[in-house]
Amino acid sequence: MRWRRYGEHAALLDCTSLEEMSAARATLAEAALDGVEEIVPGARTLLVVASPGALEAARSLLASADLDHPPAGDAREVVLDVRYSGEDLSLAAEDAGLSVDEVVALHTSAVYTVAFTGFAPGFGYLAGLPAELQQPRLASPRTRVPAGSVAIADEYTGVYPRESPGGWRLIGHTEATLFDPSAARPALFTPGLRVRFRSV
């Protein structure tokens, strides 16, 4: 890991992997250091917004932490009901060398963790996709992906919170609300949250 200064009141931690970033985020979140205002995870980075003293404490903590055995983190778990009828479900099955039923069984058997958020308000990058389902994005992104579309790409699965362009492979659809700006907690997906999918 490597720390880089990021303005006057923040530092960016470069990590070697998604797993290392997630472990560092969980460690800092559990420590709840005084002076740390915000922790923003990315695929291989962690932005820590804090006072100079808190940044130094964060550096010291992570230097001595056992990141191979990070804290459990957020104990919350949500289960989303999904209709597995996405436009790319057959393509995903063919590329994986599996039947459609096997793809659904694999996707619903995993427990996912929101690694980080981005792309659009409420969009979470969910880590934990079985290796058999890890596939590249579409060669040509769609200009319109319906809200609630459940998709896979690379090492992630995710749900489009609103209609938008997108290049992930669509395998299903959920009616769950992923982002409500008027709610006390606008985004359903926050880093560390565990997610399961249930076929309906």
Image (tube, rainbow, N blue to C red):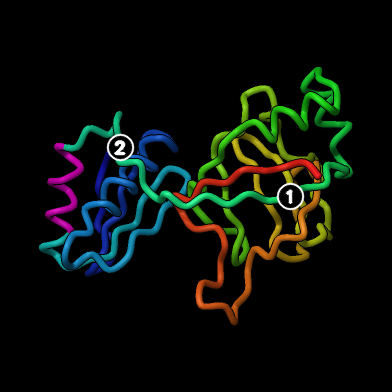
Which secondary structure lies at badge 1?
A: strand
* Magenta stretch in the rendered image: 55-64
Which secondary structure lies at badge 2?
A: loop
**Total of numbered circles in the picture?**
2
Q: Which residue is mark 1?
A: 81
**The stretch drawn in magenta includes residue 57:** yes
Q: Position of residue 89 (x, y in %)?
A: 85, 36
Q: Amino acid at mark 1?
A: Asp
Q: Position of residue 194 (x, y in %)?
A: 51, 46
Q: Is mark 2 in CB contact (under 8 Å) with mark 1?
A: no
Q: Quadrant of residue 146?
A: bottom right
Q: Give the left or right position of residue 74, taking residue 105 as reference.
A: left
Q: Which residue is mark 2?
A: 70
Mark 2 or 1: the one toward you: 1
Q: Kindly identify the residue that appears in the image at 55 percent across and 58 percent down.
A: 189
Q: Position of residue 78 (x, y in %)?
A: 58, 52
Q: Give the left or right position of residue 51, taking residue 134 as reference.
A: left
Q: Kindly identify the residue that appears in the image at 81 percent across and 20 percent down.
A: 98
Camera-nearest residue between 8 and 77: 77
Q: Residues within 10 Å of mark 1 (few under 14, many from 20)?
A: some
Q: Position of residue 35 (x, y in %)?
A: 18, 68
**The stretch drawn in magenta includes residue 191:** no
